[in-house]
């Protein structure tokens, strides 16, 4: 292959990677998943299609119970700042709460 063509192909491949990376960081759903992995996964099943939470009474995030949690974002704010069950309280920023909500809602699009 001609060297200039190799350069073009390499540049294209690299910029495709960079775009993917930025999109990931800018996606509230991806950030919400990361928060859930860090803070909720020890008790709740957090992935789509995972219906078995580690803590028996903790609703899987993809369950109807979660979907029907009225005012999810406000509820999350209360749950995280006061703690619930044996989860120690911790503070999430308004942005993190929105990310978490976006992630949970993304599990309920179908
Ligand atoms: C130490 C275990 C534990 C952790 C960690 C935990 N939960 Fe829970 N959660 C539970 C249990 C158990 C229930 C059911 C409690 C009940 O029925 O009183 C529950 C219930 C809930 C409910 C529905 C009940 C309600 O009152 O609205 C939501 C929403 C929820 N959790 C969100 C979260 C989120 C978001 C995180 C992570 C930031 C999280 N939980 C982390 C154990 C946990």
Image (cartoon, rainbow, N blue to C red):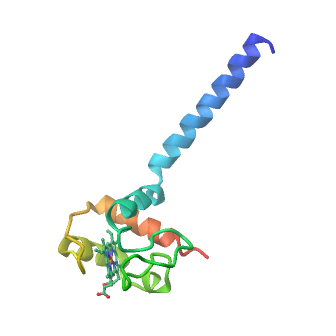
Count of numbered badges drawn on the protein: 0
The image quadrant of residue 28 is bottom left
5 versus 49 height, above or below: above
Please indicate whether residue 108 sits to the left or right of residue 7 in the image: left
Residue drawn at the location 48% of the way across and 78% of the way down? 52
Asked if residue 88 lies left or right of residue 50, the reply is left
Residue 12: x and y, percent? 66, 28
| Left or right relative to 17: residue 73 | left
Percent of width and height locating residue 78: 24, 76
* Place of residue 89 in the rendered image (x, y in percent of width and height, measured from the top left): 19, 70
Q: Quadrant of ligand 1?
A: bottom left
Query: Residue at left 21%, top 65%?
Result: 90
Which of these two is toward me, 94 or 29? 29
Quadrant (top left/top right/bottom left/bottom right) for the N terminus: top right
Instruction: Looking at this view, name the residue that lies furthest to the right.
Output: 1
Using the rendered view, name the quadrant where residue 100 is placed: bottom left
Q: Residue at x 36, y 86 (%)?
A: 57
Image quarter in which the C terminus is found: bottom right
């Amino acid at each position: 292959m001609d060297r200039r063509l190799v350069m073009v192909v390499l540049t294209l491949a690299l910029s495709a990677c960079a775009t993917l990376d930025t999109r990931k960081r800018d996606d509230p759903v991806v950030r919400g998943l990361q928060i859930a992995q860090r803070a909720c996964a020890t008790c709740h099943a957090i992935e789509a299609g995972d219906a078995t939470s580690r803590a028996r009474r903790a609703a899987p995030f993809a369950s109807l119970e979660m979907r029907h949690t009225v005012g999810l974002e406000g509820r999350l704010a209360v749950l995280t700042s006061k703690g619930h069950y044996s989860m120690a309280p911790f503070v999430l920023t308004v942005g993190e709460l929105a990310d978490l909500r976006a992630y949970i809602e993304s599990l309920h699009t179908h």
